[in-house]
Amino acid sequence: MKPSTKIIAVERMQILIRNAISNSRKFPKLSQRQAYLAKKISTRYRIAMPYEMKMNFCKKCKNFIVPGVTSRIRIGRSSLKSIRITCSYCDHTYRKVIAQ
């Protein structure tokens, strides 16, 4: 596969995720579809999705979640500083540790 094809695929994934985030409040089904297409492009061209994009997907149900719209974000209260993300679709909670 040509390197230019992979570059175009990454750009297209970024555009789709950006549009999915902006459409998430008014058009949630369109937002889910755009995120699904971005994930499909990633698997089709065997490109690892960047971390910034990957963190917008639930670890359990694999749905597209937007902080504050389709997920709840809380700051952990233990000695280990972390962010707790709760998916509003499946109520799965997972943590992201914050480096100090």
Image (cartoon, rainbow, N blue to C red):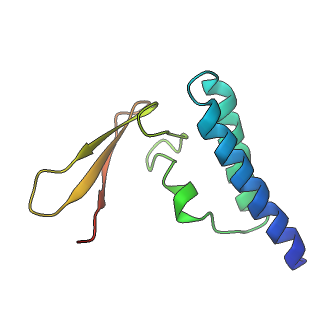
Q: Quadrant of residue 19?
A: top right
Q: Is residue 35 toward the left or the right of residue 12 in the image?
A: left
Residue 56, above or below 9: above
Look at the image and tell me whether residue 44 can be seen. Answer: no
Q: Tell me what residue is drawn at x 55 percent, y 41 percent.
A: 64
Q: Residue furthest top?
A: 26
Q: Tell me what residue is drawn at x 48 percent, y 54 percent.
A: 55
Q: Tell me what residue is drawn at x 64 percent, y 23 percent.
A: 27
Residue 21: x and y in percent read 59, 39
Q: In which quadrant of the rendered image does the N terminus lie?
A: bottom right
Q: Quadrant of residue 80?
A: bottom left
Q: Residue furthest left?
A: 79
- Total numbered labels: 0
Residue 70, above or below 46: above
Residue 31: x and y in percent read 65, 33
Q: In which quadrant of the rendered image does the C terminus lie?
A: bottom left
Q: Tell me what residue is drawn at x 54 percent, y 40 percent.
A: 63
Look at the image and tell me whether residue 79 can be seen. Answer: yes
Residue 75: x and y in percent read 22, 48
Residue 52, above or below 59: below
Residue 54: x and y in percent read 54, 57
